[in-house]
Image (spheres, rainbow, N blue to C red):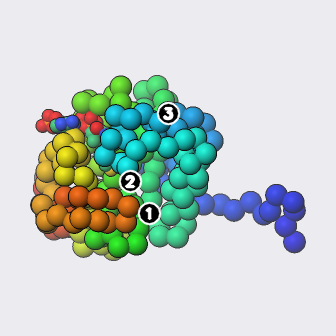
Amino acid sequence: MSGPLGEPTVIVVPTVVTDRLILRCWRAGDIDPYAAMNADEETMRHLNGTFDRDATERLISHLIGMWVLLGHGMWAIEDKGTGEFLGRAGLYFGPGWPGVEVAVSIRRDRWGEGLGMEACRAAIAWGFATLAVGEIVTFTNRDNAGMNAIARKLGMTFQGEASAIGPWRDNNVYAITRQTWEARTSG
Ligand SMILES: CC(C)(COP(=O)(O)OP(=O)(O)OC[C@H]1O[C@@H](n2cnc3c(N)ncnc32)[C@H](O)[C@@H]1OP(=O)(O)O)[C@@H](O)C(=O)NCCC(=O)NCCS
C-alpha cells in the first residue's frame, strides 16, 4: 500500500556535461525560467507561439515522462559556470515523427554563443552512444534560420519538406546517420 503521496519512484535521467553546459533532469526551480522563455514571442516565433506557466509545468512533466517511456528525452540545460537555467535540449519523439529528433531552445539573451550547437552535439553523441538508432533527425520551420543553420552545421543532410509533423507546419527535415556522425567525430 502506498501512502497518501504514493510510493517514491526513481526515474533515471542521465547527466551530460560539455565544455560550458550541464544537460540534466528537470527540477521544480526550472519552471519559472522555462516559463519566461515560453512567454517570449521572439523565442516562440517558430514554435507555434507563446504559452503560460501552467502549460510549461505540464510540458516539463511530459519531457520527464518521455525518459521513462522511451529511454530518451529532453534535458534542462544549465550553465556549467553559474548554474543558471539556459533552456532545453535533447532527443524527442512523437507520433508521426520521421525519427528520433534532436531539438534545442536556448534562452534568448544567450543566443549566438554556440550554445545551441554545443547542446545538440552532446545530445546526438549521447544518442548514438546509447540508443539503437541508425540515424537521428531534426526538423524545423523553413523560416527558422537559426535551427536550419544548426542542422547543416551538425552535418545533417536535408531530406525534404514536410507540411505537417504533429503540430509543426512547413518543416525542413534533416537527418544524420550513425556512420556519418562517427566519421565526422572520430580522430
Ligand atoms: C535556434 C537556436 C537554438 C540557436 O541557438 P544559438 O545558441 O543561438 O545557436 P549557435 O550560437 O549555436 O549557432 C549555431 C550556428 O547557427 C547560426 N545561427 C544561429 N542563429 C541564427 C539565426 N537566427 N540566423 C542565421 N544563423 C543563425 C550561427 O551563426 C552559427 O553558425 P556559425 O558558427 O557558422 O556562425 C536559438 O535561436 C533558439 O533557441 N531559438 C528559439 C527556439 C527554436 O526555434 N528552437 C529550434 C526548434 S526545436
Q: Badge 3: how crowded within 10 Å, few (<14), some, or many (20+)? A: some
Q: Is residue 41 left or right of residue 148?
A: right
Q: Which mark is residue 36?
A: 3
* Disc 3 within 8 angstroms of ligand 1 (CB): no
Whether label 1 touches label 2, CB < 8 Å: yes
The residue at 44%/54% (across/down) is 74
Of residues 115 and 131, the one drawn nearer to the viewer in this rendering = 115
Which of the marked residues, 1 or 3, is nearer the chain's N terminus?
Answer: 3
- Can you give x and y, in whole percent of width and height, for residue 87 in the image? 42, 39
| Residue name at image x 41 percent, y 68 percent | 94
Q: Which residue is mark 2?
A: 90
Amino acid marked by disc 1: His
Q: Decide which of 30, 159 is in the foreground and name it.
A: 159
Mark in the foreground, 1 or 3: 3
Q: Is residue 127 left or right of residue 22?
A: left
User: Considering the image in quadrants, where does the N terminus appear?
Assistant: bottom right
The residue lying toward the viewer, choosing from 51 and 29, is: 51
